[in-house]
């Protein structure tokens, strides 16, 4: 999924259905040509309680990502609909959001 954040649009909400025991990875990366967005990812469980918040990956060596991009890897504890908030810690620009299952079949 892709979107743009600025002073008028400060966050987007995305939803997915998760299953207890699944391991997932959510990645939000700045795709603005001038690298003007500092992504912020927030994950809420089916009860709308915040369960993860990540601003920067920092010095983690993840290929294709900058230190200001955001990644959440988590084991889901409940089955239901989860909410991802794609927001910004600073700046403005375009982002790409991906959701991957890391659960082995």
Image (spheres, rainbow, N blue to C red):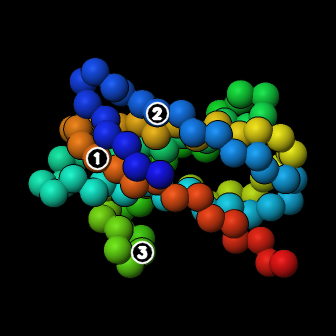
Secondary structure at badge 1 equals: strand
Name the disc covering residue 12, or none: 2
**Quick one: which residue is furthest to the top in this view?**
8
Taking the image as shown, residue 41 lies to the left or right of residue 43, namely left
Between the residue at mark 1 and the residue at mark 3, the CA separation in whole angstroms equals 20 Å
Secondary structure at badge 3 equals: loop
- Identified at 24% across, 43% down, the residue is 93
Question: Quadrant location of the C terminus?
Answer: bottom right
The residue where tag 1 is placed is 94
Q: Observer-nearest residue: 15 or 47?
A: 15
Taking the image as shown, residue 64 lies to the left or right of residue 81, namely left
- Mark toward the start of the polypeptide (1 vs 2): 2
Secondary structure at badge 2 equals: strand
Instruction: Evaluate whether residue 51 shows in this view.
Output: no
Q: Are marks 1 and 3 in contact (CB under 8 Å)?
A: no
Dot in front, 1 or 3: 1
The residue where tag 3 is placed is 62
Label 3 environment density (alpha carbons within 10 Å; few <14, some 14–19, many ≥20): few
């Amino acid at each position: 999924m892709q979107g743009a954040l600025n002073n008028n649009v400060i966050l987007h909400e995305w939803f997915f259905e998760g299953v207890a025991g699944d391991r997932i990875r959510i990645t939000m990366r700045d795709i603005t040509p001038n690298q003007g967005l500092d992504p912020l990812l927030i994950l809420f469980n089916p009860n709308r309680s915040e369960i993860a918040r990540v601003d920067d990956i920092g010095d983690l060596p993840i290929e294709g990502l900058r230190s200001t991009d955001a990644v959440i890897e988590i084991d889901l504890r409940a089955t239901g609909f989860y909410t991802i908030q794609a927001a910004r810690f600073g700046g403005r620009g375009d982002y790409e959001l991906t959701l991957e299952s890391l659960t082995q079949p």
